[in-house]
Image: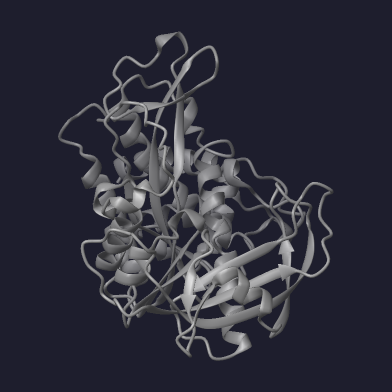
Amino acid sequence: MLNNPKVTEDQIIDETSNECKVQAKGKRVLVLNDTTIIKLSNKLNRLQDLEGLYPIGSTGINDLYGFHVNPSIVLDEQSQFILGLSNTKIVERDGRPRKKQGDPRARFKENIEDKESYKWLESCKESKRVLDGAEHVTFVMDREADTFELYDRIPDKTSSLLIRSSYNRRVILNDGSEVKMEDLMLESEVKGHLNIRVETKKRKQRIANLYLKYETVYLKCPAGKKTKFRNQPEGIKVTIIDVKEKKHKGYKNEPALHWRLISTDEINCTMEAIKQVEFYKRRWKIEEFFKLLKTDGYDIEGTQLTRGKSIRKLTLFIMKASIKVMKLKAARDGNNEEKIESVFNKDEIECINLMNRKLEGNTEKQKNPHDPKLLSFASWVIARLGGWKEFYNAKRPPGNKTFIYGLEKFDAIMIGFIAGR
């Protein structure tokens, strides 16, 4: 199937996007957009067909080939539950190593449509099309997406942007004066405080106490930047939100936690600014998604496939499966009201109920504690199929690999279930 030219990447992406479209209808959603690299070692010349791949480095012994994937994960704004993938973009290159750029400002002399950074604009436009039935869409992105054209072309009545700042931009104040963003925020007064639990492995785990500042300004198009058009030539109204750790309590060589965010939403009070910071915190979900694709789950980079195009299609299928794993993991503690129909169809639900009877024990503690109408009920069954035996211990919940094994077993059971009808 993966070698069949009739099975296209666009078909796989469209099917996944349409499922997300249904889930997001009528809801306020967050779209988390980022890029990851799928690195494939050409050890022992395993890769026989490099179509769709390009050089991305070397281990010193073997060349590394691969490709960049730019997915858009959709979350329910209120419940934080993952709804699906609104879009997936595989970055295309011509296969030649990219030349080092001499003048760092040379990129301003090119239109964004001619640069690889156009992927951010493309992804947002496609996600807006897919999520046209959503009540409101907020795109949450990291520093790589801090591109002027996004602020100018994406926000409208039903969509907005929240991007971590990468540049010390020149901004226009309400009185018409201009100032550098960093200078403005240094002089700005503290308007609030908040605590953030730091849980990433790159930082010391702790509760970070932060001060909060925010200012409403107008973004000015960078001098000399080439663009085909501007929707708002007079300037783009945004709010700069600055949060920084009061007293650094991380590792010795770890910098203090500091986020400078740019939001196109209108912010009138401290609570609204804190809400934007909470939205940005949820961006970590996409990092968990990438980890699930690689080291903590499906290990796509260790695939034994030999054809580039087949590996790209397999990646898209695994991304779809990874969303299902993340949904089951989010439902495992029974703290949300997500319906079982959001992941499983009618036949699968019937099979899950039958499997539950086989997997439950005789005592109350050995029974599935969740409502059969909720996804948490299915999460318990799939985890048990995956070998989870720690249901007596709330501190040992099932993880990614348990759900992956459980889904593999469940898919095999479903083949017999359907055939036996």
Q: Position of residue 101 (x, y in %)?
A: 40, 37
Q: Residue furthest left?
A: 6
Q: Position of residue 123 (x, y in %)?
A: 32, 57
Pick the front one: 380 or 312: 312
Q: Residue at x 69, y 52 (%)?
A: 200
Pick the front one: 239 or 229: 229
Report whether residue 87 is seen: yes
Task: Specify whether 128 is left or right of 65.
Answer: left
Task: Specify whether 243 is left or right of 356.
Answer: right
Report whether residue 355 is seen: no
Q: Position of residue 254 (x, y in %)?
A: 76, 50
Figure check: 57 above or below 138: above
Task: Specify whether 249 is left or right of 385.
Answer: right
Q: Residue at x 71, y 47 (%)?
A: 201
Q: Residue furthest top?
A: 44
How many numbered marks appear? 0
Q: Position of residue 177 (x, y in %)?
A: 48, 83
In the rendered image, the quadrant that contains the N terminus is top left
Q: Residue at x 15, y 35 (%)?
A: 6
Where is residue 229, by image quadrant?
bottom left
Where is residue 329, by image quadrant?
bottom right
Figure check: 305 above or below 338: above
Pick the front one: 219 or 243: 219
